[in-house]
């Protein structure tokens, strides 16, 4: 039997009660993305360097949260200006879909490279270390585990970042803060990158989507003003 959902006092947010009696919420539209002023207010909330860099990585790469959490330092190539996701979402149900195979590598924005250089400055970096996970708590065979097996080691970190984002979004005076989750940074990347006139096939590859999925989630008209487009360019830097 389907669980009954009721409208809350917040537009676009429904609430239901699980069979165990606990409340849960459902967003009716998951396509919300940041406008540049909203992003600036959000990211300026952070003083913790690794937290700040996590969200910057999400904005500048469009990666899924599990893909970002499984980034290693060696996956960021400073000379080429590229990033590579080696742990990616696998779509077993879509045998005809292959937007990157077992990994995805592509050019990253110039401002991200600057942010990464700042992040690692004066630090001794092991290229094989994961950037956002506690390497000491990972098993020796973590690299060879399947995605489902890896999840138990990174899921708590994923939940922590999601909770942190909600808290910081709310403090950023964004009225519909409840419409944001880490996945909305991926939506932001997809829509912001469209302002740079990147070929659709390339953008689909970077996001790990097929064309139909991309159009379903990113097919709306861009409503950025000329001033907002300039601000997006300033935030992202040079884009290839």
Image: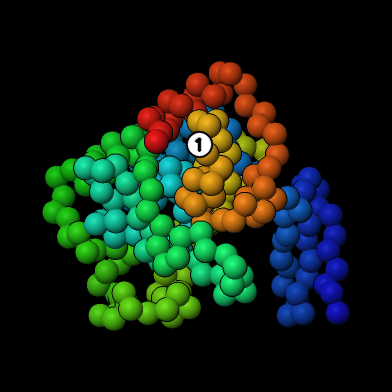
**Residue 40 % position (x, y):** 48, 32
Q: Is residue 192 left or right of residue 126?
A: right
Q: How is the image coloured?
A: rainbow
Residue position for label 1: 198
| Residue lying at the far top of the rendered structure | 227
Q: Secondary structure at mark 1?
A: loop
Write the residue at 61% across / 41% down.
33
Which quadrant: the C terminus? top left
Write the residue at 50% across / 21% down.
230
Q: Is residue 32 left or right of residue 129?
A: right
Which quadrant: the N terminus? bottom right
Write the residue at 59% across / 68% down.
96
Q: Is residue 39 visible?
A: no
Instruction: Judge whether 71 appears above or below 109 on screen.
Output: below
**Residue 140 % position (x, y):** 25, 80
Q: Residues within 10 Å of mark 1 (few under 14, many from 20)?
A: few
Count of numbered circles on the image: 1
Q: Is residue 75 left or right of residue 4?
A: left
Considering depth in this image, is 201 or 46 the residue closer to the camera?
201
Q: Is residue 58 left or right of residue 23?
A: left
Considering depth in this image, is 102 or 223 the residue closer to the camera?
102
**Residue 61 % position (x, y):** 43, 47
Q: Is residue 200 visible?
A: yes
| Residue lying at the far front of the rendered structure | 96
Instruction: Judge whether 224 appears above or below 126 on screen.
Output: above
Write the residue at 83% across / 72% down.
3
Instruction: Judge whether 144 appears above or below 41 on screen.
Output: below
**Residue 129 % position (x, y):** 24, 63
């Amino acid at each position: 039997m389907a669980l009954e959902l009721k409208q809350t006092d917040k537009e676009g947010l429904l609430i239901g009660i699980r069979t165990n009696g606990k409340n849960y919420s459902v967003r009716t539209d998951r396509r919300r993305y940041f406008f540049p002023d909203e992003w600036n207010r959000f990211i300026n909330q952070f003083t913790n360097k690794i937290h700040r860099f996590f969200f910057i990585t999400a904005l500048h790469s469009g990666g899924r949260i599990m893909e970002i959490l499984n980034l290693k330092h060696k996956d960021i190539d400073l000379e080429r200006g590229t990033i590579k996701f080696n742990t990616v979402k696998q779509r077993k149900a879509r045998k005809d879909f292959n937007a990157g195979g077992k990994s995805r590598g592509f050019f990253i924005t110039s401002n991200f490279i600057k942010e990464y250089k700042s992040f690692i400055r004066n630090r001794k970096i092991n290229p094989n270390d994961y950037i956002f996970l506690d390497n000491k708590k990972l098993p020796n065979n973590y690299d060879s585990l399947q995605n489902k097996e890896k999840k138990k080691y990174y899921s708590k970190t994923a939940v922590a970042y999601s909770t942190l984002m909600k808290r910081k979004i709310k403090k950023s005076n964004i009225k519909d803060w409840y419409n944001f989750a880490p996945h909305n940074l991926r939506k932001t990347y997809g829509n912001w990158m469209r302002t740079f006139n990147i070929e659709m096939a390339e953008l689909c590859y970077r996001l790990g989507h097929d064309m139909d999925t991309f159009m379903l989630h990113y097919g709306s008209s861009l409503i950025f003003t000329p001033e907002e487009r300039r601000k997006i360019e300033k935030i992202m830097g040079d884009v290839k």
